[in-house]
Image (spheres, helix red, strand yellow):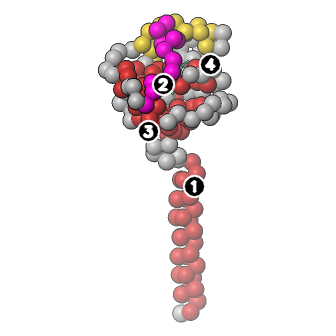
Amino acid sequence: MARSERMLAAVLVGFVVLVSGSVFAGCATAPAPDSGQAIYTRYCATCHQGDGNGIENAFPPIRETEWANGDKGRLIRLVLYGMQGPIEVKGKTYNNAMTPHGFLSDEQVAAVLTFVRSSFGNDADAVMPDEVARVRAQEGERGLFLSQELMTRTGIPEADSP
Ligand code: HEC
């Protein structure tokens, strides 16, 4: 009797270890649902790829590019409103369209851009939700930017003059 109780206890302990082990493994592989990485995987990786290298002649890389590391206002406008027209990225010309992502919240845009600016070899400062809010308030409802126009649309409006 005592022996079978010990066996039962051993099986239970084994089960608990197994379950908690897989829960922890799950945490390690799947980022929190609203993390910048999760938003990137869901909304950007289809085109720019999980490794940020893009797809030749179709989707530019975001690895160590001037856009990814450059002016935050331009980057926020790009993600909120999208862009079409020719651009040069790392010596190659792309002439395609990036879809708008204005349906993302200010927090989500800030999180995904902060992730992009600190991943894939990029090294630029974080983007804050209130910076996204100010750009959104200034631009309002609008269609895709033309690349020529967006190239010069830099900066984030002041807090008191949206
Ligand atoms: C439907 C495909 C698609 C999706 C989805 C997409 N992009 Fe793009 N992205 C493009 C294309 C195409 C361009 C270049 C547009 C052009 O030719 O004018 C671009 C340009 C860029 C650039 C500037 C150029 C460079 O490579 O540095 C950045 C930065 C960027 N995208 C980031 C993002 C982020 C962040 C997301 C997710 C929120 C995203 N993109 C989602 C297709 C996409």
Which one is in front in this view, the residue at disc 2 or the one at disc 1? 2
Kind of residue indicated by mark 4: Glu
Rendered image: mark on residue 156:
2
Q: Are marks 2 and 1 in contact (CB under 8 Å)?
A: no
What is the quadrant of the C terminus in the image? top left
Disc ID at residue 25:
1
Look at the image and give the residue range highlighted in magenta. 147-159
Mark 4 residue CB less than 8 A from any atom of ligand 1: yes
Quarter location, residue 57: top right
Q: Secondary structure at mark 3?
A: helix
Circle 2: element type? loop
Badge 1: residue crowd in 10 Å (few <14, some 14–19, many ≥20): few
Q: Are marks 3 and 1 in contact (CB under 8 Å)?
A: no
Q: CA distance from mark 1 to mark 4?
A: 36 Å
Kindly identify the residue that appears in the image at 45 percent across and 43 percent down: 34
Q: CA distance from mark 4 to mark 2?
A: 17 Å
Residue 22 higher or lower than 159, as above or below: below
Q: Which residue is mark 3?
A: 107
